[in-house]
Amino acid sequence: MYTYAFLLNGDRPLELPEGIWGPLELVSLAEFVDALLAAHGGKPLSPLQIALLQSAWSTQRQDYRQIAKRFGYSENYLKFDAAPKLWRLLSELFQEKVRKANLQTVVERQYRQQAILPPVASKPCIQPEQPDFNGAAFPSSRFNQFDQFIDVPIDVSLFYGRVEELTQLQAWIEQHCRILVLVGMGGIGKTALAAKLTQRLTQQDRFEVILWRSLAHAPQLNDCLRDLINAIEPASVEVRDITTQLLVCLKQKRCLIVLDGVDHLFQDSAPDGARFDGAGHYRDGYHNYGQWLRHMSETLHQSCLLLTSRETPREIAQLEGTSVRILPLAGLGFADMQSSPAIKGTLVGSDQDWQELHRRCAGNPLVIKYAVSAIQRLFAGNLRLCLQGTLVFGAVRDLLDQQFNRLSPLETELIYWLAIHIEPVSLPELQTDLLSSVPQSALLEAIDSLLRRSLIELAFPALVAKQSPLFTLSALMMEYLGEQLVRQIYQEIINQSLQVFHSHSLIKAQTKDYIREMQTQRFLRPLVDLLHHHFQTKPRLEHHLRQLIPLLHQEAKPGYAAGNLLNILTYLQIDLTGSDFSNLTIWQADLQGVHLQEINFSRADLSRSTFTKPLGGALSVAFSPDGKQLATSDINGTIRLFGQFSGILNE
């Protein structure tokens, strides 16, 4: 068996026995690839790419650790970033799948097909066509007039909507903005918008260099910067200050650098007892990214960084101004959703059905895509039938779980309360709901963090006739969090480990009637349905629920657990005669129309609960020996007597 040596000097190729390759032949292999790249208007391989190529070819391969040490990169960067990009580059070049295992076979076949190439210098360069994003890993021209334009991850040929956003981004670029940030929740279309913008700028010849880099594998900053420098100026000599070296490149050439998925550099959560700083804070070992971004925003250069992230980086929020712009992405409008080629004619439903789908998906393109696919599979395309149930399942739940699981305990507590309130709520109202005394600074930081995560929304006070800022959730987050809350409390009741059941009320007894009814339908009824399904019979369920009462007496701390338990028992129409709720904090219990005879409420705190007749600040409650009368006294010195059917006898 023979192996070809690629000596591109116009002579016949040498045929050498397999396994005797030397350094000269390996260099010639790189020259062969460079010649093909040049024929398509591309750049030659970088020294790092040549080393990876040689490692894959040679019988005495260097592993990634050795190559990383030689070039000053991390092993993970080579394994998850540089090497995959090289195989994709060769796959596009040779028009067939290339990987380490088949590299030698593919190159030999390609060489035989190419026959003998003339010297690279004498090969005329093919003028590339304009890229049109046909769904491949590269534009259709493969290698265009720019130094780099690779790895755009999605096909934007079916891109729709976002006209105002594209116009705004281009205006900021023309104003020489140095950092642009697209921020929004998962699936909202940040990457697609960045790709569409990049395509437009490519066609308009606005930049000399366009680079797209994904941060999904969280490369170290030095690895990322070296990669960018090698792409912009492969022949540049590395200096000690790599940040300065990149800045010199960005001053000499007008570059657009897209860093997709900056949120992969941020904290997911904190270990038990450790401080968690909220949205936009870097993981250990990645804080230098923040320093670099600050440096890029404050130093004069002619280039632009375009970042996409689910969370606004903290330093970016602080730097927002002329040179740093943030574009929060909301959902698509209803008209834009209707114009999507991906969903036209896919489902059967009325205009009202489509509007309801848009509302419940909050205009999120990826959620809409997942929902449409599920409706086709599970409901034969019947939109109205699907809308009778939940849309939060499968891929939609997975998408939202990713962001919910990143929240700090205080953020989780607040976002649950926003779901419970249903209507927009003010900061003072939220602070009243919390059991623990949280400093206002911590509360403001948590709310700001949720806003920077794009999980909550700011409602305009003028629309609801209130003075202080109001916060709320999208319909999608409202549905997701409602189901999340119910599932969490269901598990706590089953396991008799009451945490969220203690810290949050399922209904707000003192709220408006229609809100209380909505809370009953969203939280109380689904919870009872789950419990019924688990215990099978009502007596078994009642027995388990009554076992929680002694547990509440043991803990004996202020909270919503007793009120929640009473609301569940009364919803199930369970006879409460003889129950002992003495000395308990009973908040947000809706006891209107409920027969309360022979229930021990002595020394119970009923101050946030409701009865058929309001008990303004009740201090004590007691039943008569025959259980037919209830006496209460309040902070105003008023004593009320209630009859068996909740009618006031005297006051």
Image (cartoon, rainbow, N blue to C red):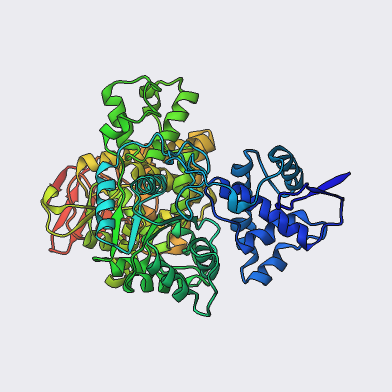
Corner quadrant of residue 340: top left
Q: Is residue 576 visible?
A: no
Question: Where residue 82 sits in the image (x, y, percent)?
Answer: 60, 58
Residue placed most toward the observer, 546 or 61: 61
Q: Is residue 59 left or right of residue 613?
A: right
Residue placed most toward the observer, 348 or 638: 348
Q: Name the residue at the bottom extreme.
A: 240
Q: Is residue 647 left or right of residue 254?
A: left
Q: How many marks?
A: 0
Residue placed most toward the observer, 201 or 5: 5
Question: Where residue 128 sits in the image (x, y, percent)?
Answer: 47, 43
Question: Where residue 530 sits in the image (x, y, percent)?
Answer: 47, 38
Which quadrant of the figure contains the N terminus?
Answer: top right
Residue placed most toward the observer, 358 or 477: 358
Name the residue at 14% across, 46% down.
649
Q: Is residue 312 left or right of residue 245?
A: left
Q: Is residue 254 left or right of residue 21?
A: left
Q: Is residue 145 visible?
A: yes
Name the residue at 49% across, 44% down.
398
Question: Where residue 396 sits in the image (x, y, percent)?
Answer: 45, 40
Corner quadrant of residue 114: top right
